[in-house]
Image (spheres, helix red, strand yellow):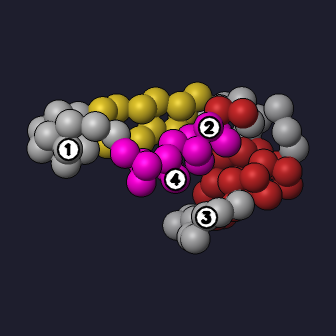
């Protein structure tokens, strides 16, 4: 796994705001993989190019050794 400084650099790249950076750092210091979840409920039957922004960030977390959970709903499609 990458050191905390390198992880933060990758996580922050392309990120506008981290709501609680201190809490994130504390969790990274524990040395255990994070579980990062994203729920998507597309307004159309497809996932489109606009979804790639957050999907790419999920991939960053995955490359850093964290666990990623993607939930795709069907409530509005």
Q: Judging from the image, what secondary structure is the residue with disc 1 in?
A: loop
Q: In this rendering, would 32 be left or right of 69?
A: right
- Report if residue 5 lies within the magenta region: no
Q: Which of marks 1 and 4 is nearer the N terminus?
A: 1
Q: Give the range drawn in magenta.
A: 48-61
Disc 3 target residue: 15
Looking at the image, do the residues carrying marks 2 and 3 touch, with CB atoms under 8 Å apart? no
Query: Is the stretch drawn in magenta largely helix, strand or loop?
Result: helix
Disc 2 target residue: 59
* Nearer to us in this view, 4 or 53: 53
Q: Where 74 sits versus 25, above or below?
A: above
Q: Position of residue 7 (x, y in %)?
A: 78, 48
Looking at the rendered structure, the number of numbered marks drawn on it comes to 4
Disc 1 target residue: 44
Label 2 vs label 1: CA separation?
A: 23 Å
Q: Which residue is drawn at 37% across and 45% down?
A: 48
Q: Residue at x 52, y 67 (%)?
A: 19
Q: Earlier in the sequence, mark 4 or mark 3?
A: 3
Q: Judging from the image, what secondary structure is the residue with disc 3 in?
A: loop
Q: Residue at x 58, y 28 (%)?
A: 67
């Amino acid at each position: 796994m990458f050191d905390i400084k390198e992880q933060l650099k990758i996580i922050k790249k392309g990120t506008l705001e981290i709501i609680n950076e201190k809490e994130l750092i504390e969790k990274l210091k524990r040395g255990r993989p994070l579980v990062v979840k994203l729920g998507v409920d597309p307004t159309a039957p497809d996932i489109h190019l606009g979804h790639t922004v957050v999907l790419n960030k999920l991939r960053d977390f995955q490359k850093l050794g964290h666990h990623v959970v993607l939930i795709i709903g069907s409530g509005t499609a």
